[in-house]
Image (tube, rainbow, N blue to C red):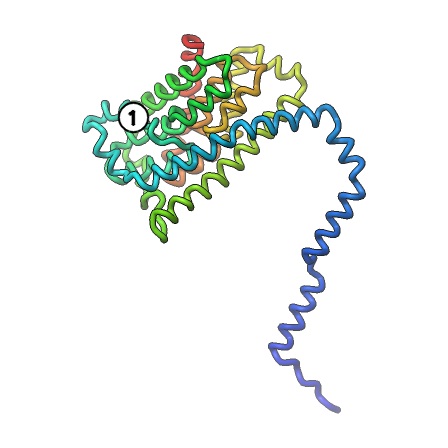
Amino acid sequence: MASTKPAPPEQHRRETETEEESRRLTSPLLLTLVLLLAVMFQDPARRALAAPVMQSWMTVFVAVIVQALPFLVLGVLLSAAIGVFVPPSFFARALPGRTALAVPVAGAAGAVLPGCECASVPVAGALVRRGVAPAAALAFLLSAPAINPIVLTATAVAFPDDPEMVLARFVASLLVACAMGWLWQRLGRADWLRLPSRTAYDGPGGRGAAFWGSVRHDVLHAGGFLVVGAMAAATLKAVVPAEWLRAAAGNPVLSVVALAGLAVLLSICSEADAFVAASLTQFSLTARLTFLVVGPMIDLKLFAMQAGTFGRAFALRFAPATFGVAVGVSVLTGMVVL
């Protein structure tokens, strides 16, 4: 009786790969299936897109994206340039030695970092690592995404009939940043704050590679959140019953709380959030101001970034305090300015 010789390992591996490939969906096959499904459901899809609700949804979505995208791209480019080519030691030398004075100076210096909150967290971490007082670095972290020229210009474009919104956003954001810096100076503890282990934008390839790496990172992240925010704004305008929005907007307390919570959940880039807020016309200017102040200071992605940079013990204390101060200052500023 002849014995069968086992197949060589290499031949057995090739046979196994051939069997797996035969069972695997190839790209042409997958594309064919998608096209067949599109043909089968083209009539229902055409009817759905032609519905008034979908037409309204797409109009708001495209309008928000088209208005916000130039500001987002410009802000990302400027933020990457400053973050890469301006050394953090420059800010350390420019700040006063006394922490109480350094906090408002650092808060006002946030205007020189035209970018979203994605850039402010690593830069603030680098400031702390280079010896800047944590209270001043935190004031810079909160103010930079909210009072820089790109964001304020975008706010003016989004609210052409309400120019006081620009002043209200600037004042409220700067007050919150300074208040949180002084609060940290007064109550913060060193063991709550983990020092960052490396500088921002480090990487191989020199400054040019770091610049384009920062641009790619911020465009992907901020652009994704912009799309999500535009989709949410369009859904609120087109799908949510108008009486629900009127009920929330008609209650001053509920409207502020609702938009503050929405700002945290949507996590929109600060260069684009003004256009989303402008589309929420059912709500008062004070409620929309709260949306604009809270969003750049505390949202889901910021909480994750702050926890990763400064530690979870810091984020669990700093984020709720920032939220409460931002809501309170926004309401007071809205009562005075708007």
Asked if residue 322 lies left or right of residue 45, the reply is left
Asked if residue 131 lies left or right of residue 58, the reply is left
Considering depth in this image, is 296 or 316 the residue closer to the camera? 296
Asked if residue 236 lies left or right of residue 99, the reply is right
Residue 206: give x, y in percent of width and height: 34, 50
**Figure quadrant of residue 45:** top right
Q: Which residue is mark 1?
A: 187
Residue 132 drawn above or below residue 216: above
The residue drawn where x is 19% and y is 28% is: 97
Element at label 1? helix
Residue 14: give x, y in percent of width and height: 64, 73
Q: Residues within 10 Å of mark 1 (few under 14, many from 20)?
A: few
The residue drawn where x is 32% and y is 22% is: 178
Classify the position of the C terminus by image quarter: top left
Residue 204: give x, y in percent of width and height: 36, 53
Q: Is residue 102 visible?
A: yes
Residue 223: give x, y in percent of width and height: 52, 36
| Amino acid tagged 1 | Leu
